[in-house]
Each structure stands twice: as C-alpha cells, then as structure tokens.
Amino acid sequence: MALIGGGIYVHQLYQKTGKSFNKMYTPPKGTASTKIQQGKPFSILFLGVDTGADGRIDRGNSDTLIVVTVNPKTRKTSMHSIPRDTLAEMIGDKKRNMQKLNAAYNLGKSTMAKKSVGHLLNVPIDYYVTMNMGGLKTIVNAVGGIEVNAKMNVGFDGVWITKGKHHLNGTQALAYARMRYQDPKGDYGRQMRQQEVIKAVAKKLISPKGIGHYDDLLKALQPNVRTDINFNTLATAAFKYRHNASKITSEHLQGNSAWINGSSYQIAATNELNRVSSNIRKELGLKAEKVDNAETRLNALNPTFNGSTNQDFNTFGLDTVYYTENTY
C-alpha cells in the first residue's frame, strides 16, 4: 500500500506496478473480502515463511505471524505478533489437530493459516500476505537499506550488529530479524525486531527517496511475495488508507512456556486471548466477544499450569483431539 501510494500517480509506474502485482496475486478460495473497496477497517495476516532462507526449498513454516489491522477512521495501523510456537487448533483438518501455530501454513497453506489464526483469536482475517524470509534481504536492499535502533547486540549467521542506531543492508536486516536464541526475550524479542524492520521499510517507501527505488523494489517483491489482494483493491487501499502508514503501533500475544510430549510450546492464557481479541476487534470496529475454542477449553482443563513452576500441559483433555507432534 505504501509502495503504490508513493508512485501510483505516475501513469507509467501504475501500469508497471499492476503487471508486477498481478504475478503476486493468488485468488482466494471462496468469496473475496470487499472491505477495502467499501472503505471499512480490515485485517491482513502477514506470514513470514522460512522457505528461501538457509537454503530451504520446501514450503516451510510461517515463523512470523502478524495480524495487521488498518482503520481509516482512526488513521491507525496496528500490528499484533503471535508467537510461532503457540498451541492452536489447525482449522481445516478433518479431525481436531492441535499443533504449533506456525505449522498451519505448512499443512494447509495460507487458507489454513488464516482460518487457524482467526479461530484462535475470534477475529475475522480478511486478507493475507506471505513473504519469503529469504527474500527479505533483497527487498531491504531494493529500498536502499533501513534504519534501526538495536536494543542489544545481535549476532546471527556470522553477521554482528552492536547495540545502537545503524543503517542496515539486506543481509544485516535479515540477521537482525531472525536472531532468537541469544535474545533474553526469545521469540518475543525477535517479534519486536521484525516489527521494527517492517516499520522501517514502510517509512522508506513513503519517503521521497522511496520513489527512486521503485523499479528495484518491484523486482524484489515479485518472486518473494504472494497475496489474495488484487491490484485494483490495493490501488483503492493506497488512496483510501494513505494516512495509515504514518501511525503504526505494535503489540503481541503473550504466551506461557509449556512442555508437551518433550517439545516446547507457548500457551496463551484465556484472559490473554480475550485481551488481544478485544484489541483487534476494536480496531476493526467490532464489539468484544469472549473467545471460546479448543484452546480456552484446554486452559480450563489445566488449572495448575502457570508456565513457570508448572510447565506440564495436557492436550488430551478434549474429546476427539487428534494431536500431531510438530517436527518442523
């Protein structure tokens, strides 16, 4: 949206942008959302998939999951990150299948990811955007690099970034966004850095200098991004929601550490699911509703679990639960 809003006023760029985005567009299964055309608040599930990084060539998991809401009335864009290891029901399987949330994309592509995230938080997910994390460095290079303010020393894949303000190239930005194990906050710290990178790219796109990188960015986006938002809808969004790019807030779903069959998971408490659900629904102009799903029912069946002194979590408390160990 920021890209189109910055360059769409030039007819030649408009045509070039349309051709590029048509190659990224995948028609949704079922009825497509019309919220953007109607000028209503809408949500996008942003999926950063691990295909293309570290030499991977399979579909991969969505190790980055961010629910983005865009509200034209408040002129506010909100990002809610969801931990990749959150225990969730895979919506779309014939049996009730509880896995790490990042497996939904691997099992059922973006369709299952949208349904699973929407069901977990009891919120409508209108659109999706997937980005190949291996292509992130190409995209950052295409905009001429980004500015970040590292809160700690970051080291990953032989790349080192010291604490403080830096101008990062693509390779550095990818390392900055992916490092997890050395961060005291673990995946939550990584989520904060990923959101910082997204904001930095958006800021670059809406700047006067961003137009100068327009061609390079289109070439970088085309093989690395897929979405169910067609170009005409994106063009509409660029005008109707153009003020939203300057006001972006960050949030996350907080989980508790758990061990299930020898693997580490994050369990979102029922009150936390309701908090994040209410926040997202408010941004979408919807009334708050209590979350009632397999996750909240499992929470009720594990009253002594707290993520610290008791990290054992029983996933077999519900009838017909089909639990599959996530090996990815």
Image (cartoon, rainbow, N blue to C red):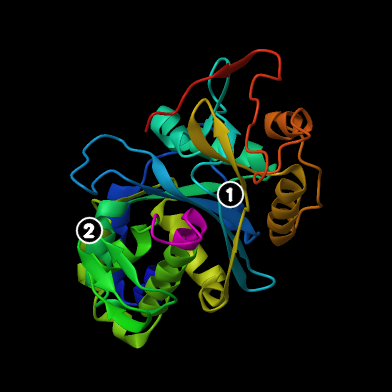
Residue under label 1 = 34
The answer to if 184 sits in the magenta stretch is yes
Q: Judge left or right: residue 296 versus residue 172.
A: right
Q: Which residues are magenta?
A: 181-191
Sequence-wise, the earlier of marks 1 and 2 is 1
Viewer-nearest residue: 80 or 37:
80
Packing grade of label 2 (10 A; few <14, some 14-19, many >=20) is: few
* Three-letter code, disc 2: Asp
Say which residue appears at 41% left-offset and 74% top-offset: 152
Label 2: element kind: loop
What is the x, y in percent for residue 325? 47, 24
How many numbered marks, from 0 up?
2
Q: Are marks 1 and 2 in contact (CB under 8 Å)?
A: no
Q: Judge left or right: residue 137 versus residue 49.
A: left
What is the x, y in percent for residue 297? 75, 29
Residue 157: give its label: 2
Q: CA distance from mark 1 to mark 2?
A: 42 Å
Q: Is residue 131 above or below residue 79?
A: above
The answer to if 178 sits in the magenta stretch is no
What is the x, y in percent for residue 317? 71, 20
* Three-letter code, disc 1: Thr
Q: Is residue 152 above or below residue 325?
A: below
Viewer-nearest residue: 156 or 228:
156
Viewer-nearest residue: 256 or 281:
256
Packing grade of label 1 (10 A; few <14, some 14-19, many >=20) is: few
Residue 243: give its label: none
Say which residue appears at 43% left-offset and 66% top-offset: 193
Outermost front residue: 309
